[in-house]
Amino acid sequence: MKRKILGIIIILALVIVAAGCKGGSEEKAMAATARKYVELLTTKQIDEAKKLVTGTAAIELEQFGKALAKDPSEVKIVKFDGHLVYLNRDKTRGIYEVNYEKSVAVQDLGRATMSYVGRFGLVKLDGAWKIYSLRWRNADL
Amino acid sequence: MRKLLVLMLIVGLLGAGCGRPSEEKAMVEVARAFTEAVASKTFEVAWPLTRDREAATLLQDIPMMIALQGERKIENTYFYVDYLDGNRGSVIATYTQTETVPDVGTSRGEFKMVYEMKKVGKEWKIVDVAQLSVK
């Protein structure tokens, strides 16, 4: 009886660890997608950025993408740290939040550093993570 | 003693699942009521179902929605809870929307939406809405 209970506990523990591991790899993939998207926007590669979005994020990028492409400011990513807020049960959708700091140089005006918190909604489509929602807020508020 | 421990483990596991079906039902009801209220432009019904970001967004968008949104009909609706952890969760909704705008025409499309929600007191509120895919 004791061995059976111990066996069940070990199996349960392995299942829990395995579930966590899968979550870890998905989190990394989500983080990579979020980072890539921001990098593409800072370098104004709008057409490439469009490949990483769907849903509301795609609609919004379509609306502001042209204006962004014409933005003369030069942007550098200073900091991009994130964490998984949650992943749904079948690991196909989740929220990833980042602390993002960028340095912006505007011609004749100098350079400024800005901090934001970005909340990325990501969904897994055909094996790849795509951003369906992106909400930014000022990190200082 | 062993029997008691096993019994406690079983009760604990069952307890973790209890209450979940009623929470999921409540979340779906809120999401459904909100979707139908926005479609029928009964914003006085939609507004109390929101909080935080979505409340602010709705407040901002209502005048435009009243002016520009045509007659909307939603059908083939399906709502389900995609995530639930304590006082936070999300509902996915799929539906077919037909919109008729005077002098413009009629459009029909399939929508898949996600409603981020949080429990405020005893009630679930929608804090953010996003379209999950574009078709």
Image (spheres, helix red, strand yellow):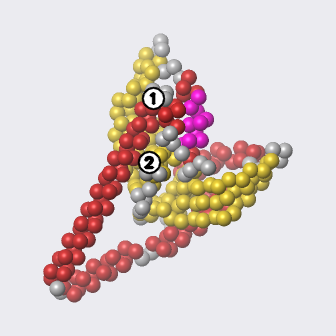
Secondary structure beneath dot 1 equals helix
In the rendered structure, the answer to whether residue A62 lies left or right of residue A49 reads: right
Q: Secondary structure at mark 2?
A: strand
Residue B62's x, y, as percent? 69, 48
- Residue A81: where, in percent of width, then height? 34, 40
Residue at (62, 55) in percent of width and height: B111
Residue in the image at 40% along x and 74% along y: B17
In the depicted structure, whether residue A141 falls above or below residue B34: above
Quadrant location, the N terminus of chain B: bottom left
Residue A65: say if magenta: yes
In this view, the residue farthest toward the right is B103
Query: Residue under circle 2?
Result: A129
Residue B112 among magenta residues: no
Q: Amino acid type of disc 2?
A: Trp
Q: Which numbered dot is residue A42?
A: 1
Whichever of callouts 1 and 2 sits on the residue coming sooner in the sequence is 1
How far across and down, in percent of the image, does residue B86 sit? Answer: 41, 64
Residue stretch rendered in magenta on the structure: A57-66
Residue B101 percent location from the top left of the image: 79, 48
**Residue beneath the point at 23% across and 86% down:** B4
Q: Residue furthest front?
A: A126
At horizontal 68% and vertical 61% (from top left) the residue drawn is B36
Amino acid under disc 1: Thr
User: Label 1, label 2: how many angstroms apart (C-alpha)?
Assistant: 20 Å
Pointer 2 chain:
A
Q: Nearest the camera: A139 or A39? A: A39
In which image quadrant can residue A115 be found? top left
